[in-house]
Image: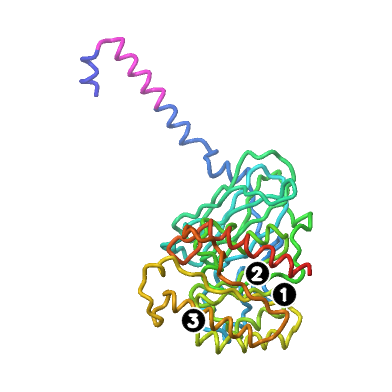
C-alpha cells in the first residue's frame, strides 16, 4: 500500500489518508456502539400475547386458534381435523394508542399454496374502526420461517383505536403476539363493536376457507363480519366440505343465529343425498327455529370448454347433478326455516371472479358477500 501511495502526489495522498482515517474511525464507533438496531427496538417495543385480548371465530369449547374442539379429533375425518387447525376466520380484537403496530407469530408449517398469496395463507391483516366502519390498515407479511415478525404500520397519530386482526387462512398459528411501543397502552376492546352473541356460522369448502382471497380480511365471510358487526365463524375445509353431521354437531353448542351450508362444490350428488338429510335432521332436532341456508355450487369457468360428460367432475352436467341433489333435499324437507340460494348471479356472469376457474379472487369474494348480505341481514332481522 505504501509503495503505491509513494507514487501519488502529496495533496492526493493526504486526502486518501484522511478519508481512510474517517472511515476506520466510523467503523470502530459503530462496532463499539451498544445501541444496535435490535437492542434499540427491544428498548422501545414490547409484545403482548394476543390470547390476552378478545378472540373471535371460535366455536364453543374450542382451544386457541383451532376451529374444532379437541373431542372432534375422534369424530371427524382425519383430513377435516387437520384442516381445522388452520386459523381461517379467527381474529383478535384489541384497543391500543401505539403509533406503531408489530406482529410476531409462529406457524405450525410455512407452506404456500400455488393459487394463493403468502399474506393470505400465512400472514395477517389489520383493520381499525374509524368513522363508523372497519378500515384496512396494513398487513403482516410472512417470511419463509416458522417464526415471523413484521411491522404492520408505523408513524400513526397517537390516539386510542379499536383494532381487528385477521389470522392466516391456510395455516395454523402456534403463538401470536402484538407489539406496541413501550410507552403505549394495549387492552381488550373498549367498544363492543362486533356482537359475539349467537354467531353466524359457515360450513363449506376451500372457497369458504378463503381460497383465493389476496389477504385474510377479504374472504366473503370476513367481509360479512365487518359489515354486519356480528361474529362469523368460518368452518371451510378445503376439499372436504361434505355436509357431515359429524362436523355440524360441534356447531350447535354455539347457538348460531344463522347456519350457511356451502358444501355443494365438494360433494358428489350421492353424498349430498346421503349426508344432507341426516345433517338437517340433526340441526332441527337441536334447534328447529335456526335459519339454514343451502347454497348451490357455482359453475366453474372451465366447464364452458369441457365435453358434457356427466361422470366428469366440474362439467356442466356434473354440477347440475350436484345442484339437483341439493334442490331435492331442500324440497323434501318442507321446513320454512331452510332457505335455498341458486348459483344464478352468485359471483357475476363475466367469468372474471376466480383465480383458477374455481376459487374466488377478491372480486369473486366481494360479489359473493354482496349476494349473501341482504339474505343474512333479513334472517337476522325478520
Depth order, front residue of 39/288 = 288
Give me the C-alpha separation between circle 3 and circle 2.
29 Å
In magenta segment, residue 10? yes
Q: Note whether residue 121 is visible.
A: no
Q: Is 214 situated left or right of 303 in this image?
A: right
Mark 3 vs 2: CB contact within 8 A: no
Q: Helix, strand, or loop for circle 2?
A: strand
Expressed as whole percent of the image width and height from the top left, the position of residue 190 reads 79, 54
Q: Helix, strand, or loop for circle 3?
A: helix
Image position of 325 with respect to 159: above or below? below
Which residue is tagged 2? 233
Mark 2 vs 1: CB contact within 8 A: yes
Q: Is 195 situated left or right of 327 in this image?
A: right
* Label 3 crowd bin: few (<14), some (14–19), many (20+), radius 10 Å: some
Image position of 262 with respect to 105: above or below? below
Depth order, front residue of 245/146 = 245
The image's mark for residue 321 is 3
Q: Helix, strand, or loop for circle 1?
A: loop
Expressed as whole percent of the image width and height from the top left, the position of residue 206 reads 51, 70
State the extent of the magenta-drawn residues as a range: 9-23
Which sits earlier in the primary sequence, circle 3 or circle 2? 2
Give me the C-alpha separation between circle 2 and circle 1.
9 Å
The image's mark for residue 256 is 1
Magenta stretch, main secondary structure class: helix
Amino acid at each position: 500500500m505504501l509503495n503505491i501511495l509513494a507514487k501519488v502526489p502529496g495533496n492526493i495522498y493526504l486526502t486518501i489518508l484522511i478519508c481512510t482515517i474517517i472511515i476506520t474511525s466510523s467503523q470502530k464507533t459503530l462496532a463499539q456502539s451498544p445501541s444496535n438496531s435490535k437492542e434499540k427496538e427491544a428498548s422501545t417495543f414490547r409484545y403482548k400475547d394476543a390470547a390476552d385480548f378478545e378472540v373471535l371465530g371460535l366455536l364453543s369449547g374450542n382451544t386457541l386458534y383451532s376451529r374444532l374442539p379437541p373431542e372432534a379429533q375422534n369424530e371427524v375425518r382425519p383430513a377435516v381435523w387437520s384442516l381445522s387447525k388452520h386459523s381461517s376466520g379467527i381474529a383478535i380484537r384489541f384497543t391500543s394508542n401505539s403509533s406503531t403496530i408489530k406482529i410476531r407469530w409462529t406457524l405450525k408449517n410455512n407452506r404456500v399454496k400455488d393459487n394463493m398469496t403468502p399474506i393470505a395463507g400465512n400472514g395477517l391483516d389489520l383493520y381499525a374502526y374509524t368513522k363508523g366502519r372497519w378500515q384496512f390498515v396494513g398487513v403482516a407479511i410472512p417470511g419463509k420461517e416458522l417464526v415471523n415478525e413484521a411491522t404492520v404500520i408505523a408513524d400513526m397519530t397517537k390516539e386510542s383505536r379499536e383494532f381487528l386482526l385477521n389470522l392466516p387462512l391456510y395455516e395454523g398459528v402456534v403463538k401470536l403476539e402484538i407489539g406496541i411501543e413501550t410507552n403505549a397502552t394495549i387492552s381488550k376492546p373498549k367498544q363492543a363493536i362486533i356482537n359475539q352473541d349467537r354467531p353466524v356460522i359457515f360450513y363449506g369448502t376451500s372457497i369458504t376457507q378463503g381460497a383465493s382471497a389476496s389477504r385474510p380480511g377479504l374472504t366473503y365471510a370476513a367481509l360479512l363480519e365487518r359489515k354486519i358487526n356480528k361474529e362469523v365463524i368460518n368452518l371451510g375445509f378445503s376439499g372436504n366440505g361434505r355436509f357431515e353431521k359429524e362436523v355440524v354437531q360441534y356447531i350447535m353448542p354455539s347457538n348460531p343465529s344463522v347456519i350457511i351450508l356451502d358444501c355443494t362444490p365438494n360433494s358428489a350428488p350421492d353424498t349430498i343425498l346421503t349426508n344432507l338429510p341426516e345433517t338437517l335432521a340433526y340441526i332441527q332436532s337441536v334447534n328447529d327455529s335456526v335459519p339454514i341456508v343451502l347454497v348451490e355450487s357455482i359453475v366453474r369457468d372451465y366447464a364452458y370448454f369441457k365435453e358434457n360428460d356427466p361422470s366428469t367432475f366440474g362439467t356442466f352436467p356434473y354440477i347440475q347433478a350436484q345442484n339437483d341433489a341439493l334442490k331435492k333435499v331442500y324440497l323434501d324437507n318442507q321446513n320454512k326455516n331452510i332457505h335455498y340460494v341458486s348459483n344464478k348471479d352468485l359471483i357475476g356472469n363475466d367469468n372474471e371472479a376466480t383465480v383458477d376457474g374455481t376459487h374466488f379472487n377478491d372480486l369473486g369474494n366481494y360479489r359473493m358477500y354482496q349476494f349473501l348480505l341482504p339474505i343474512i341481514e333479513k334472517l337476522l332481522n325478520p
